[in-house]
Amino acid sequence: LPLAGSQDHKPIFDDDRGPNTGGMGAYSPAPVVTPEIHQWIMERIMVPVVRAMEKEGTPYVGFLYAGLMIKDGLPRVLEFNVRMGDPEAQPLLFRMKSDPVPLMLAALEGTLAGKEIEWIDEDAVCVVMASGGYPGSYEKGKVISGIAEAEAIDGVKVFHAGTKKGPDGFVTAGGRVLGVTAAAPGISEAIARAYKAVDKIRWDGVHFRRDIGRKALNRG
């Protein structure tokens, strides 16, 4: 059962500069994946991989994530993961109108055939807020403010990644700290909402990219 596409931003700095990270933000849908390319990916990559595992006597059950690079309309496989991507999952699940739990149960029970996923007709953008110094060394224990104010914005959800509870509220506890995600009609409005929420959140040394979603705008 195909999920929608989601595009990640690996490098730490704007314009894809600097060392790679676990992901500094993502958006869904990804305009680079046209309906034709989506069909090609399913028919030439995803389904053959699943069928091959079944033929080997080890049928696969679960999420199968393909990290792809698409150049001149041709997808090439970079990696496979047996889980959803992070932060790709945040905007993807934000757009999913269907309840994912019955779908996961159907996968476990072998009754996924004929199931469909309903999507909301909106774009979603996730901006990762990281500790200064990431993906190198960084300090922990910085007090975070503004999460409630960010989530008060319509269409916004703040996903915790590298946080923990401190005596004065949440503090940083990892490299990638928060995934600030927003959905809206149109990619430009989703980007604006996400960064409006990001600007509400503060801690000493916070770092994030300012260009998440720009590639989708350029393709529009």
Image (cartoon, grey):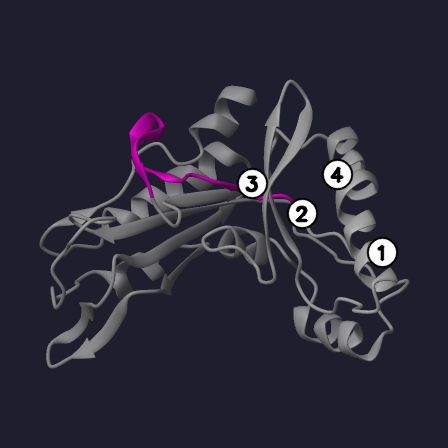
Confirm whether the magenta stretch covers residue 47: no
How many numbered badges does the structure rendering display?
4
Distance of label 1 from label 2 (alpha carbons) = 21 Å
Q: Earlier in the sequence, mark 3 or mark 1?
A: 1
N-terminal-most mark, 1 or 4: 4
Instruction: Point out the stretch of residues depicted in magenta.
Output: 4-20
Mark 3–mark 1 Cα distance, whole angstroms, equals 37 Å
Label of residue 4 in the image: 2
The amino acid sitting under disc 3 is Pro
Q: CA distance from mark 4 to mark 2?
A: 12 Å
The amino acid sitting under disc 1 is: Arg
Which residue sits at x=51%, y=35%? 187
Mark drawn on residue 185 = 3
**Left or right, 155 with reference to 196:** right
Q: Secondary structure at mark 3?
A: loop
Mark 3 or 1, closer to the camera:
1
Nearest-to-viewer mark from 4 and 3: 4
Identify the element where label 1 is drawn.
helix
Q: Position of residue 120 (x, y in %)?
A: 65, 51
**Residue 23 percent across, percent down from the top left:** 40, 47
Query: Going 82% across and 48% down the picture, which residue do you hit?
Result: 48
The answer to if 7 sits in the magenta stretch is yes
Rendered location of residue 26, percent (x, y) = 46, 44
- Mark 4 or mark 3: whose residue is earlier in sequence: 4
Q: Are marks 4 and 3 in contact (CB under 8 Å)?
A: no
Q: Which mark is residue 41?
A: 4
Q: Residue lying at the far front in this picture: please name it.
A: 56
- Label ID, residue 51: 1
